[in-house]
Amino acid sequence: MSAGDATTHEQATAYVSPWSKADRAAMVAWWLVAAVLFRPSPKFFARWRNALLRRFGARLEGLPFVSQTAVVRIPWHLTMHDRACLGEHAEVYNLGPVTIGARATVAQHVYLCAGTHDFAVEHLPLVTAPIVIGADAFIGAKAIVLPGVTIGEGCIVGAGSVVTKDTKPWHIYAGNPARPIKERPRPRPRDTPPESDRPADRG
């Protein structure tokens, strides 16, 4: 997590909320709406769930997909671009801003954690930092992405990985902590045959 990206929230003690009364009221309202109208909705009601998220301040471009079993803690801290996907039981612990790029996939049970604490201070004030998932990235099942991390465009994060630092675009990462394994080939257009199947150039 970059110190420049992190925000330490004012708290008089560990037992005082860093959020304003208005924020806390909005969080309670969202919790009720999510319980009654969001989670019971069938899978194909994606537009309905998007409308609820937008009503609570989420910035959704185009037609992203959010599973009915996904958890979004603070909708107004969420940005999703066209065809981004938030899979089953994924949790966006977005005490800080979280952005999911176009066509990026956050698979089932992934945990995006945009909040932590300052453990050097006795009362452990809340510290938040943004998470950015680049376009065309894929976050594998049960992976964890920590505060302040940017996942590069087209990057694949293996299942169960813990990402503590920014990742390079178009690379594959895995492990705890996640490390680069190899480059990811850029997808070819749908109707283009693999290079091995193409006829050799004739001079």
Image: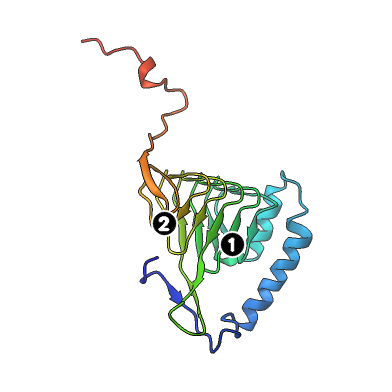
Indicate the quadrant containing the C terminus: top left, top right, bottom left or bottom right. top left
Q: Nearer the viewer, mark 2 or mark 1?
A: 2
Q: Say the numbered circle drawn on residue 150.
A: 2
**Relative to residue 83, is residue 191 depicted above or below?**
above
Q: Residue furthest bottom?
A: 12
- The residue tagged with tag 2: helix, strand or loop? strand
**Relative to residue 193, is residue 92 depicted above or below?**
below
Q: Say the numbered circle drawn on residue 58.
A: 1
User: Mark 2 or mark 1, which has the lower sequence index?
Assistant: 1
Can you tell which quarter of the image residue 194 is in?
A: top left
Tell me the crowding category of disc 2: few under 14, some 14 to 19, or many 20 or more residues within 10 angstroms, Cα based.
many
Q: Say the numbered circle drawn on residue 172.
A: none
**Image check: 182 left or right of 132?**
left
Q: Nearer the viewer, residue 190 or 144?
A: 144
Residue at x 52%, y 55% (from the top left corner):
144
Q: State the separation of the CA atoms marked 2 and 1.
A: 19 Å
Where does the image place residue 145, in percent across and percent down from the top left? 49, 57
Residue type, mark 1 in image = Ala
